[in-house]
Amino acid sequence: MSEFLLIRDAQRMAPAAEGRGDVLVAHGRILAVGQGLEPSGCGATVQVIEANGRLLCPGLVDSLVHFGGGGGEGGFATRMPPLSAATALAAGVTSMVGALGTDDITRSHADLLACARSLAAEGLSAYTLTGSYQVPPVTLTGSVRGDIIFVPEMIGLGEIAIADHRGSQPSAAELARIASDTRVAGRLSGKCGKVLVHVGEAPEGLALLREASTRWPVPITQWHPTHINRNARLLADGIAFAKEGGSIDFTTSSTPDFVAAGEIPAAQALAQALSAGVPIERITMSSDGQASLPHFDAQGRLVSLEVAPIGSLLESVREAVQRYAVPLSTALASATSSPAAIWGLERKGRIAVGMDADFVLLEPDTLARALTVAAGRVNRA
Ligand code: ZN
């Protein structure tokens, strides 16, 4: 890796459109943004990328990836493999938040953390959440607070399951306590201390979160509920929740079976939430990558499983623009600046001096990925 990287003549999407120019990177951080930049006189090697007017966007920030491997709900043969760095880079994702999921017995925080560190060795920024679907939360150090305070990668808790047959059916009081522990640990360690909430199919939707935030001093911003595009009823509930001040996440990996069962594609849900007046700062999209996606036959029997693709995040950004007429800067924000702000990742999700040198370069006409830069390292695969 050269000490310096110069990306020349790119249309910057920061994620707001900022016009054409250059970006100079030094040692993995953005050193300068402007016109006609040249690193000169210091004798360092400079790697140059001629962008030729392509779109330079922040590397995508994926709010939920089971990068240690997810699934397993159909038996041991349905456990999904860990994510490779190459797969994430090919998807334009440079930062991700990892979580255990349903299985916190054969999967562990030690393993998830090892996976995060293996991804970090390739330039990716991988964070983790303590806990799992279940209550009481499983931890690495013995407590939620200990995990978040002592483990640098652990920034919050989740995905804890509500309204789902696979969860522990927590009470509002239990959720309030867990959210408060997470919040206090976040404050003590300078992290966001948020709770990612897996919301299942049961009709109560987000009622427990509202109850916890009404009866106890738990700010509504403490929660980041996901799978809000699961069905029309939950989407309406989520839009209301976001208009009350909360934030919401849409899942981009899907199957035709899910859509036939009422799931709203993430790109469509994004357009719907925006037109209902939800500020983009309260909306994220995430891939739920490496979870299992089931395929059923006409009789409803499981015939096969596939790994939820992390590439669905960039695909949904593209679909939001091309099919649902969401402005590119707004669609990008849902996978860059919004998740970075919600997760307290101060050097992620934007292109500006001092930020980490994480980018995805897109073709202006098709929005196809040309290359990814993670911590200043260029990946063209
Ligand atoms: Zn989930």
Image (cartoon, rainbow, N blue to C red):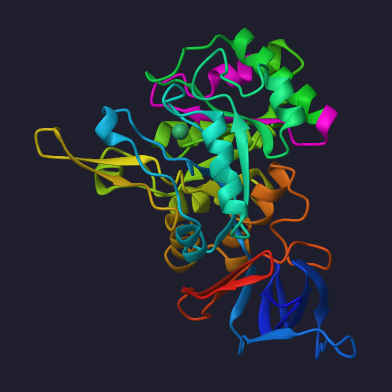
- Residue 343 location, x and y as percent? 69, 42
Quadrant for residue 304, please give it: top left
- Residue 234 location, x and y as percent? 45, 32
Q: As drawn, is 372 to the left or to the right of 288?
A: right
Q: Please state which of residues 90 and 255 is positioned toward the viewer in this rendering.
A: 90
At x 45%, y 59%, the residue is: 87
- Residue 217 location, x and y as percent? 77, 16
At x 56%, y 50%, the residue is: 118
At x 80%, y 87%, the residue is: 35
- Residue 323 location, x and y as percent? 42, 64
Residue 189 magenta-drawn? yes
At x 68%, y 55%, the residue is: 337
Check the image and name the residue furthest to the left.
Answer: 299
Q: Quadrant of ligand 1?
A: top left
Q: Please state which of residues 98 and 52 is positioned toward the viewer in this rendering.
A: 98
Let me know if residue 276 appears in the view.
no
- Quadrant of image for the N terminus: bottom right
Q: Please state which of residues 348 and 53 is positioned toward the viewer in this rendering.
A: 348
Check the image and name the residue furthest to the right.
Answer: 41
Let me know if residue 36 appears in the view.
yes
- The part of the chain drawn in magenta is 188-211
- Above or below for 267 versus 12: above
- Above or below for 141 versus 24: above
Quadrant for residue 282, please give it: top right
